[in-house]
Image (cartoon, rainbow, N blue to C red):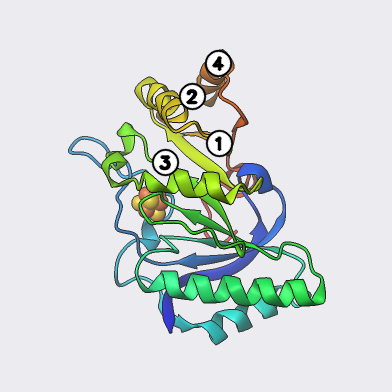
Amino acid sequence: MFGKIHEVYSSISGEGISQGIPTVFIRFAGCSLRCGKTETRALWCDTAYALGPNQGEEKTLESVWNDLEKLDPHHGYQVLLTGGEPLEGKNRDLSTALAKQIYEHRMNVGRPYPASRVETNGSERITEDSFFIFTMDYKLPGSGMEDRMDQENFRILEKRHNSLDEIKFVVRDRIDFDRSIEVIREQKIQTNILYSPVHGEVDAKELVEWIKVDNPPKCRLSLQIHKVLWGNQKGV
Ligand code: SF4
């Protein structure tokens, strides 16, 4: 078994309810979505360097486990499986085996963060497995990718009933924000909700004003702290 890995590094978690926690990032390569790209507008993906089928290096479970142990020998950091898309194609098998092994090891030796957080794009089917915590995107109209969303994922999040799961809405404009409110109501979402503005397209302060008016349940603004600290650098 192998997956395509772009990079493994340690830093702090940049966003969401785990923001600021020391974290090992396992970045998978390859993603079949192309968020934000239209005839007139550019791709907004932060990790465009990790999208193509030829990106990354094929790695086995053992090899990624070794990388993890070098960066975090005492298993004290959160583990974040990100991308690209960690649940797409062969990456899914490696993500599953890795998260299961981390979970069993940390439960046995009594370490924090036994479950691995997965940042997934909403087009791949999530699972009820307790060795995963999900940060699941729901792509809004401005991304051009809403028709790729797997609506069944909302039912799975409901069944998981995990207080650490979160749904992320990346907002390009007011149309996107209004659509997010519609989705929250239609799907009766009870999970934590994150709102992030598309950089350079909507002012975060304006997004705050919209959030204050509608005040969806369990929602928060989520800005990427690593960009504040290091700008657009990779591997931090
Ligand atoms: S789903 Fe994520 S990785 Fe894929 S194109 Fe969109 S932003 Fe980039």
State which tag comes first along the sequence, 2 or 4.
Answer: 2
Residue 229 pos. (x, y %): 65, 46
Mark seen at residue 194 = 1
In the rendered view, would you say 139 is above or below 30?
above
Mark seen at residue 203 = 2
Quarter of the image where the C terminus is located = bottom right
SS at circle 2 = loop
The alpha-carbon separation of the residues under discs 1 and 3 comes to: 10 Å
Mark seen at residue 186 = none
Q: Which residue is mark 4?
A: 209
* Mark nearer the viewer, 2 or 1: 1
Nearest the viewer among 143 and 184 is 184
Mark seen at residue 138 = 3
- Residue sticking out furthest to the top: 213
State which tag comes first along the sequence, 1 or 3.
Answer: 3
* Mark nearer the viewer, 1 or 4: 1
Residue type at mark 4? Glu
The alpha-carbon separation of the residues under discs 2 and 1 comes to: 16 Å
The alpha-carbon separation of the residues under discs 1 and 4 comes to: 15 Å
